[in-house]
């Protein structure tokens, strides 16, 4: 699902065309790099936080359509990125900002898109495109600009249809860290956590550091022995891109941790890892949840949270009952109020839970930040249980 791009250049006003796999065509102007790119067309509903979206590894292989019409007014800075680079395959906006207007900005968004080779398109009816994707579902797409846009539509559509699909895509190896690294606790170190990097965002270990957690970030594919060598009080499975049905190694690691009663917390892709480890299936959503305004109910407290999402797959678990699994009883802890999609799992007999959304939410909202406190409480309870058992 990596983006396939011709020569990158910047050409203000260059012609650009967006071609969906079902043949729908939108014409506009080049935005960012000029060339050709392919990916899965998805829409994101956030009105802010575009820098965090662009640098979120979960968007690997996706062409992101921004539903908010005006993008780029706050520019780009050196503090807000969630990783070292932009991961989106392409970017679609309606009205790019003509100038940057923010004291923290160091450069414009279009300059950064060019520098990082992200092909985009502007000046199209993103509302019409969003409605099309909402009705037809996420699908493959190509953006072509400059010389690449001069081919006939039939040829461009054929190129789109030759590009890979998201179903069956294994992408965590593309985005994971190559070497382990440590994010120290802020203040006194209370806990040690091994975080499996399936596409982790920089804000996640920071949120844990704020709570006295030293986080050892490990590459995807790390073995149980490598995880246990850290001496973790708990293990965290991060967000990430791709089809969870391909992540057999991470699912097996999760099972072995559950057998040892090591506290586990997963978000997004990590939620799907826990779901599969417990014996549930996963499936692809029609168009997914992406943005920072998705309503989710915590079924334990009844509280409704406004949450940040980026997922195209979900866990297939029953909402109406507690399930019996190889690791004991499990309940659906959170549910999306828009479409009743499973948004969280809670194990009742082993120390593990997960959510499908993003409690770190660097661009906001912060309604779900309490989940890191739940992880702390889970690790503290596990420590107390271990001490009592050894007494």
Image (cartoon, grey):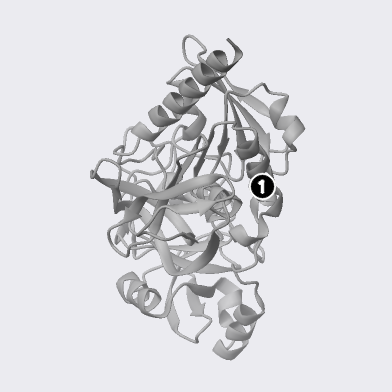
Q: Quadrant of the N terminus?
A: bottom right
Residue at left offset 41%, top offset 80%: 136
Identify whether 266 is placed above or below 145: above
Compared to residue 117, the image places residue 200 above or below, namely: above
Q: Position of residue 148 (x, y in %)?
A: 60, 75
- Quadrant containing the C terminus in the rendered view: top right
Q: Which quadrant of the structure image shows residue 210?
A: top left
**Position in image of residue 106 (x %, y %):** 43, 36
Q: Nearer the viewer, residue 260 or 36?
A: 260
Q: Is residue 335 visible?
A: yes
Q: Residue at x 39, y 39 (%)?
A: 359
Residue at x 41% of width, y 37% of height = 360
User: Pointer 1: what residue?
Assistant: 250
Residue density around tag 1, few if under 14, some if 14–19, many if 20 or more, within 10 Å: many
Q: Identify the secondary structure beneath mark 1.
A: helix
x and y, in percent, of residue 135 in the image: 36, 79
Pick the front one: 166 or 278? 278
Q: For this rendering, which residue is in front, 343 or 58?
A: 343
């Amino acid at each position: 699902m990596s983006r396939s791009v011709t020569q990158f250049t910047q050409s203000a006003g260059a012609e650009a065309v967006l071609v969906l796999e079902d043949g729908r065509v939108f014409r506009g102007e080049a935005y960012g790099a000029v060339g050709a790119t392919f990916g899965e067309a998805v829409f994101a509903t956030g009105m802010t936080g575009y820098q965090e979206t662009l640098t979120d590894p979960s968007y690997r292989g996706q062409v992101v359509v921004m539903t908010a019409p005006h993008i780029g007014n706050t520019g780009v800075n050196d503090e807000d990125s969630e990783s070292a680079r932009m991961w989106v395959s392409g970017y679609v906006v309606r009205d790019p900002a003509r100038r940057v207007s923010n004291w923290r900005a160091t450069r414009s968004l279009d300059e950064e898109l060019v520098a990082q080779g992200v092909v985009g398109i502007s000046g199209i009816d993103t509302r019409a495109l969003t409605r099309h994707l909402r009705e037809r579902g996420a699908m493959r797409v190509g953006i072509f600009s400059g010389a690449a846009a001069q081919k006939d539509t039939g040829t461009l559509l054929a190129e789109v249809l030759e590009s890979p699909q998201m179903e069956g895509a294994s992408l965590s190896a593309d985005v994971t860290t190559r070497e382990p690294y440590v994010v120290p606790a802020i203040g006194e170190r209370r806990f040690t956590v091994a975080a499996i990097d399936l596409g982790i965002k920089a804000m996640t270990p920071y949120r844990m550091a704020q709570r006295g957690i030293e986080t050892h970030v490990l590459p995807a594919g790390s073995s149980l022995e490598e995880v246990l060598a850290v001496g973790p009080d708990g293990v965290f499975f991060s967000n990430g891109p791709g089809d969870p049905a391909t992540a057999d190694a991470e699912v097996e690691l999760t099972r072995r941790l559950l057998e040892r009663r090591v506290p586990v917390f997963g978000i997004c892709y990590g939620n799907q890892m826990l779901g599969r480890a417990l014996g549930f299936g996963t499936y692809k959503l029609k168009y997914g949840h992406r943005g920072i305004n998705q309503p989710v109910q915590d079924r334990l407290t009844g509280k409704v949270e406004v949450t940040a999402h980026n997922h195209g797959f979900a866990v297939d678990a029953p909402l109406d009952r507690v399930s019996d699994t190889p690791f004991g009883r499990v309940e659906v802890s959170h549910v999306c109020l828009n479409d009743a999609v499973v948004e969280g799992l809670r194990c009742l007999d082993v120390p593990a839970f997960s959510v499908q959304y993003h409690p770190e939410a660097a661009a906001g909202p912060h309604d779900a930040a309490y989940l890191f406190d739940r992880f702390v409480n889970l690790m503290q309870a596990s420590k107390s249980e271990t001490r009592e058992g050894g007494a």
